[in-house]
Image (spheres, rainbow, N blue to C red):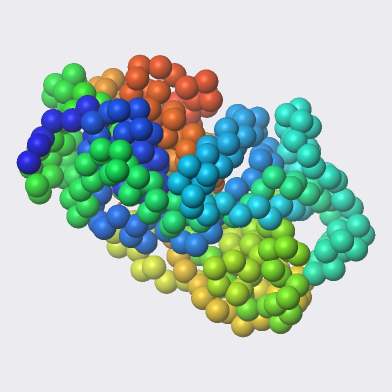
């Protein structure tokens, strides 16, 4: 078996595959090593739907989102595969909510369409909603649903077509950085070496790069499909995506994939280890979601159809990490989750490919350096 490549990517989740696809497209000889089967559901990238939105409170992410939308549309057209379904999105919160103010500023500065609604006009336009009296709402039409499993399957397959070597069921056991110019990885199938190494191992990053221990928090998050009492009111044409910027942040989808309204509570699941987690949805979290529906979307508060769990890997700042390994400038550490990473994946691919080419992508700002983005979490007291 061939053992030398231009670039090795560890991790066949969406971040690793987006990178492999972009690198292969640019003519690089790429090897992807994935510990499980491609498309598995034990990490962060599986499932039927992810929110895409331009409405971002932070300007760096607003800029990334605009670039990502262009790239998702390019994939969709070039590969004639339905990855993105526009639905619009409602950002909801009390009128003094700082995130809503920042979202408006960023949308306005970048010339994006949006509307601001008060509680009464929300209820008139979308009678499914029973808003709080003090709610303010931003409606942005340029938002929609990405299909993560399909996107991952597509870009994995296309990476292969473009010449990447894809090895699944090949866990990387450790990195050998004794020669920083030629990083090596040890697997059960042998040792592989490359000029550049990308470590995009999601929740398993600290196992490969112990310097990340204590800097990434892995939680088991859950999403729940509720069968609406009035299904016709919750089809994508009538019911946009939403995010309620309260604590915990509640987000929801119209009926898509399954004929149910999908709800999630951002960053509210238990801290886990990726190898020993139980995978079981927590009934208490489902009840919090149901209470939200009963209060604000009563027509959607029907029986639970399905509840599933998935992993978040979060930094203390909530930012992604792209930084070189302290022991080798030819190794890039990538953490692209914090529960919001999917929408940006084509940009992650570009950022990584630019790094491989020895350049810094203009959207890869100092925000994503390891020390800034991922200082250690405080030890439990
Ligand atoms: C419930 C939930 C809802 C979300 N909702 C949204 C949303 O609405 N919008 C949005 O933009 N984002 C969302 N996200 C975030 C998004 O899904 C993640 O940002 C993204 O999937 C992270 O991809 P990844 O490749 O970094 O991680 P993963 O998909 O976990 O990939 C890491 C891969 O590395 C492999 N690996 C690890 N160690 C090794 C090793 N030693 N050897 C070989 N392979 C290894 C793993 O098996 C895995 O396949 C959500 C995430 C979750 C969990």
Q: Is residue 66 left or right of residue 170?
A: right
Report which quarter residue 287 is drawn in. bottom right
317 up-or-down from 124: above or below: above
Residue 73 locus on image (x, y percent)? 56, 42
Report which quarter residue 44 is drawn in. bottom left
Tell me how many marks there are: 0
Q: Residue at x 33, y 49 (%)?
A: 157
Q: Residue at x 75, y 35 (%)?
A: 112
Name the outermost residue toward the top.
358
Between 20 and 286, the one lying in front of the other is 20
Between 164 and 17, the one lying in front of the other is 164
Q: Residue at x 36, y 68 (%)?
A: 278
Res 72 visible: no
Report which quarter residue 205 is drawn in. top left
Between 320 and 166, the one lying in front of the other is 166
Residue 147 locus on image (x, y percent)? 51, 56
Res 13 visible: yes
Residue 176 locus on image (x, y percent)? 15, 31
Q: Residue at x 68, y 63 (%)?
A: 236
Between 177 and 215, the one lying in front of the other is 177
Residue 38 locus on image (x, y percent)? 30, 55
State which quarter of the image contains the N terminus: top left
């Amino acid at each position: 078996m061939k053992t030398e490549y231009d670039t090795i990517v560890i991790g066949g989740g969406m971040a690793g595959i987006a990178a492999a696809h972009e690198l292969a497209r640019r003519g690089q000889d790429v090897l992807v090593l994935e510990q499980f089967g491609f498309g598995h559901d034990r990490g962060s990238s599986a499932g039927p739907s992810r929110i895409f939105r331009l409405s971002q409170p932070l300007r760096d992410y607003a800029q990334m989102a605009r670039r990502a939308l262009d790239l998702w549309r390019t994939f969709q057209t070039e590969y004639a595969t339905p990855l993105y379904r526009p639905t619009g999105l409602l950002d909801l919160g009390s009128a003094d909510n700082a995130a809503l103010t920042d979202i408006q500023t960023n949308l306005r500065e970048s010339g994006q369409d949006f509307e601001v609604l008060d509680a009464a006009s929300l209820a008139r336009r979308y009678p499914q909603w029973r808003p709080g009296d003090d709610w303010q709402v931003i409606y942005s039409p340029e938002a929609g649903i990405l299909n993560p499993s399909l996107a991952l399957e597509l870009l994995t397959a296309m990476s292969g077509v473009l010449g990447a070597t894809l090895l699944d069921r090949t866990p990387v056991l450790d990195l050998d950085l004794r020669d920083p110019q030629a990083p090596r990885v040890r697997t059960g199938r042998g040792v592989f070496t490359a000029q550049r190494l990308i470590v995009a191992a999601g929740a398993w990053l600290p196992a490969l790069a112990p310097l990340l221990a204590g800097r990434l928090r892995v939680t088991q998050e859950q999403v729940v499909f509720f069968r609406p009492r009035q299904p016709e009111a919750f089809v994508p044409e009538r019911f946009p995506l939403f995010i309620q910027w309260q604590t915990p942040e509640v987000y929801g989808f119209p009926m898509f994939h399954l004929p149910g309204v999908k709800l999630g509570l951002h960053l509210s699941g238990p801290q886990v280890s990726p190898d020993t987690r139980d995978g079981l949805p927590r009934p208490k979290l489902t009840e919090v979601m149901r209470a939200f529906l009963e209060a604000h979307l009563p027509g959607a508060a029907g029986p639970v159809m399905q509840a599933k769990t998935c992993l978040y890997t979060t930094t203390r700042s909530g930012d992604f990490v792209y930084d070189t390994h302290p022991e080798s400038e030819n190794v890039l550490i990538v953490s692209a989750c914090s529960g919001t990473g999917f929408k940006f994946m084509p940009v992650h691919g570009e950022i990584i490919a630019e790094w491989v080419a020895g350049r810094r992508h203009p959207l890869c700002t100092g925000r994503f350096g390891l020390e800034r983005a991922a200082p250690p979490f405080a030890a439990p007291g």
